[in-house]
């Protein structure tokens, strides 16, 4: 049986945030504000996720003219599957508790 | 250029070459932040991220290990160079025999070179320095064995009495191999 990857709470938070709007391209600063993670924690996580094929990256032109392009991120299909799996795991115990009550 | 962007540019330069695109991404992100205080805090985090990408725990461990082994080897080498002029203790005054002097100097210099190449990790010169250290070690072993065979040395002398220089050389090469292996080994878990 393949070993399940070990995911830190910070990675879970980033996965959950990106999975909330799976088709939307997100920027580092926005993700940092939304997750509450400092850029020193966020970027190494994004780099690992991209290395593992879980995160798609793209240089995107900003909506406001005259601004330089920004690096944007969203989950790949593989990343979405992992995020969905981890979200289901998080919700499952709560569901079980409700069923027991 | 603002201070925050300057810090982000430093971060981009610090990142390993295969991560430079991420450095550009950080700098572009910092440039897009309107609030100067937020921009500086974000840039400082990027600098921290770049440093942690550059100096991983394993790299620091391997460097400390090489430095430690290198320093011990330097002391060992300096002891040989010291012996050439001061002898090996009160009961062994310096013997100005060309063979002995040459042996001590070659042991000292070859180990000194091996230590330097270990700390600054140059694998090929390190192996050459170890080979150079093995020559006087081999000479001592042959000298001792020849003395035993010709019966000119004390009876009961065992081979290890003469082959002992190979022990530190083997330990040095073993440590170098271990550190090289640790450096090559995968450093990150499946997902951080």
Image (cartoon, rainbow, N blue to C red):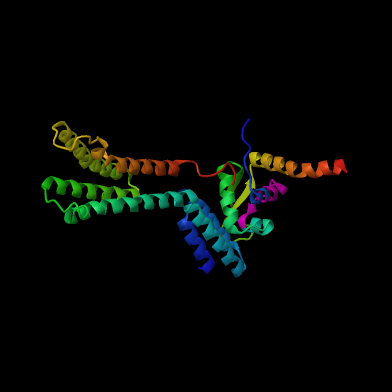
Horizontal relation, residue B163 to residue A98: left or right: left
When the figure is inspected, residue B29 is found, relative to residue A75, above or below; the finding is below
In the rendering, at what x and y percent does residue B5 appear? 52, 64
Task: Identify the image quadrant of residue B155.
Answer: top left
What residue is drawn where x is 82% and y is 41%?
A96
A24 falls in the magenta region: yes
Which residue is the extreme one toward the front? Answer: B155
A39 falls in the magenta region: no
Which residue is the extreme one toward the right? Answer: A101
Tell me how many marks there are.
0
Asked whether residue B91 is in view, the answer is yes
Q: Nearer the viewer, residue A49 or B1?
A: A49
Horizontal relation, residue A48 to residue A17: left or right: left
Asked whether residue B2 is in view, the answer is no
In the rendering, at what x and y percent does residue A15 appear? 67, 47
In the rendering, at what x and y percent does residue B151 appear? 14, 33
Q: Nearer the viewer, residue B121 or B160?
A: B160
Horizontal relation, residue B124 to residue A58: left or right: left
When the figure is inspected, residue B123 is found, relative to residue B37, above or below; the finding is above
Which region shows up in magenta? Answer: A13-28
What residue is drawn where x is 44% and y is 43%?
B182
What residue is drawn where x is 38% and y is 49%?
B66
Q: Nearer the viewer, residue B21 or A43?
A: A43
In the rendering, at what x and y percent does residue B128 appear? 26, 42
């Amino acid at each position: 049986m393949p070993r399940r990857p070990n995911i830190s709470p910070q990675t879970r938070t980033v996965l959950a945030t990106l999975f909330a709007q799976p088709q939307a391209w997100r920027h580092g600063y926005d993700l940092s504000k939304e997750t509450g993670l400092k850029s020193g924690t966020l970027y190494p996580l994004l780099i690992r996720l991209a290395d593992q094929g879980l995160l798609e990256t793209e240089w995107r032109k900003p909506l406001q003219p005259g601004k330089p392009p920004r690096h944007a991120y969203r989950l790949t299909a593989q990343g979405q599957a992992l995020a969905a799996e981890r979200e289901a795991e998080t919700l499952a115990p709560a569901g079980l508790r409700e069923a027991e009550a | 250029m603002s201070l925050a962007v300057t810090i982000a540019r430093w971060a981009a330069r610090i990142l390993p070459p295969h991560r430079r695109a991420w450095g550009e991404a950080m700098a572009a992100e910092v440039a897009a932040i309107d609030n100067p205080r937020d921009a500086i805090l974000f840039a400082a985090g990027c600098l921290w991220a770049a440093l942690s990408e550059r100096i991983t725990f394993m790299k620091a461990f391997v460097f400390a290990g090489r430095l430690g082994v290198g320093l011990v080897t330097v002391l060992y080498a300096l002891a040989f160079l010291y012996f050439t002029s001061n002898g090996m203790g009160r009961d062994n005054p310096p013997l100005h025999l060309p063979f002995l002097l040459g042996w001590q100097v070659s042991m000292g210099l070859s180990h000194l070179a091996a230590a330097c190449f270990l700390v600054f990790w140059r694998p090929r010169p390190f192996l050459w320095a170890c080979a150079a250290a093995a020559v006087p070690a081999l000479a001592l072993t042959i000298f001792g064995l020849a003395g035993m065979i010709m019966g000119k040395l004390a009876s009961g002398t065992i081979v290890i009495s003469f082959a002992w220089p190979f022990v530190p050389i083997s330990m040095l090469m073993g440590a170098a191999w271990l550190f090289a292996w640790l450096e090559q080994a995968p450093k990150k878990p499946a997902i951080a």
